[in-house]
Amino acid sequence: MSNYNKIESAVIHGGIYGDKTTGAVNVPIYQTATYEQSGLGENTGWEYSRTGNPTRTSLEALIAELECGKKGFAFASGMAAITAVLSLFKKDDKIIISSNVYGGTFRILDKIFKNFNIKYEIVDTTNLDLLEKSIDVNVKAIFIETPANPLLTITDIAGVVNIAKKHNILSIVDNTFMTPYLQRPIELGIDIVIHSATKYLGGHSDIVAGLVVVKEDTLAEKIAFIQNATGGILGPFDSFLLIRGIKTLAIRMDRHVENAEKIASFLQNNKAVKKVYYPGLKDFVGYEINKKQAKNGGVMMSFELYENCDIRKFFKSLHLIALAESLGGVESLVCHPASMTHASIPKEIRDKIGITDGLIRLSTGIENIDDLIFDLNQAIEKSEV
């Protein structure tokens, strides 16, 4: 990071900061589709906004710096970002994915890319021996989430990097849950980092966006070509909003994590709660690995209530915390993975990997912690039958 050493400063001053023409401290919204050229083959470096837009370029430079990567790319959604990365592969290539990943990642591999004979295999990537044994000549990439969605399982990033390098394949991490403020996979050797920037990077549940950061130039050239050729780019206004959201990332994440740690402790000590999945708890499987590669346990958690609790009553009884898809906004959100975020995964696979019908996922917001615990407690009490 140039001119400063800490990410708290980089989120505000990183990438392309301000506007040199006017002195504005914020990058302008270049709301234009095209750019006037002074003559044939003569332009200012800008030709058409699908190929490049100054506001989007500023965002892309910012996320590349925050993730310590070579180059960043902004897309219209997290799924558009994932689609661009999966477009690196060709017929008969196989991609290994973590056993619990976002349902949309599974769906696009199973329903879209499978049509082009790009294969996938679901593997418990927390088991590095099993992961390595799963690699054959057709495997071209390992795609992980850590912590994974929704069971927060932890995969050893450095271990995945070592295996990928040994077999000369790509390593890809979806870093949505942690953000570069809490975890920087490229520093650990990962080739490609993906974000659903709709979540913590945007931070206010008001935009849909995706980001990709790559480690080296060859990958940058390939993703740049795919981005321009397929056209799933992020518009200038949303790019501006995302830059604005990132400016408060550090301070927001500190409050998110502070609240999450207290809620995880509350849930763990509640007699109606059967199990809590949160990487910040010392008895959580993967705690030590996560501690090694991330700043803390992050914000996301999932939990299960005992069988004498009716989760429908639990969801209905919440007043402050909203039942909604998505995560990462300033407001606290709960969802039911089996019927919402992971409904596209067949039930037999969900059951096998632990995404039960009783699992509840919580994205802790930045509200007053006493209000959040009160809301959870009264909803749990009303759910008991």
Image (spheres, rainbow, N blue to C red):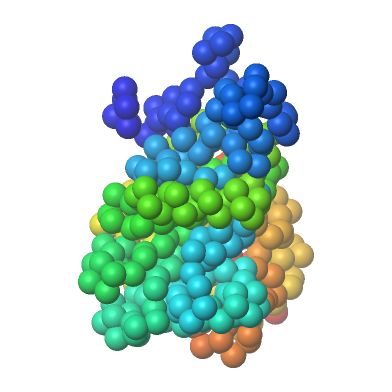
Query: Which residue in the rendered view is the most extreme toward the top?
Result: 22
Quarter of the image where one finds residue 290 = bottom left
Residue 201, given in percent of the width and then of the height, sits at: 54, 43
Query: Is 337 placed above or below 205 here?
Result: below
Depth check, front residue: 59 or 198 = 59
Q: Nearer the viewer, residue 88 or 38?
A: 38
Q: Residue at x 54, y 64 (%)?
A: 87
| Among the 4 quarters of the image, the one containing residue 7 | top left
> Percent from the top left, x then y, of residue 167?
27, 74
Q: Which quadrant does the C terminus fall into?
A: bottom right
Quarter occupied by residue 44: top right
Task: Say left or right for 314 vs 293.
Answer: right
User: Can residue 278 be seen?
Assistant: no
Image quadrant occupied by the N terminus: top left
Q: Position of residue 183 (x, y in %)?
A: 37, 50
Towards the viewer: 127 or 92: 92
Residue located 43% across and 67% down the image: 144
Residue shown at 71% from the left, 31% from the top: 34
Instruction: Locate residue 1 relative to residue 107 in the image: left or right.
Output: left
Q: Residue furthest bottom?
A: 348
Q: Residue at x 29, y 29 (%)?
A: 5
Please state if 70 lies on the left or on the right of 107 as rendered.
left
Does residue 79 show up?
yes
Q: Is residue 110 above or below residue 221?
A: below
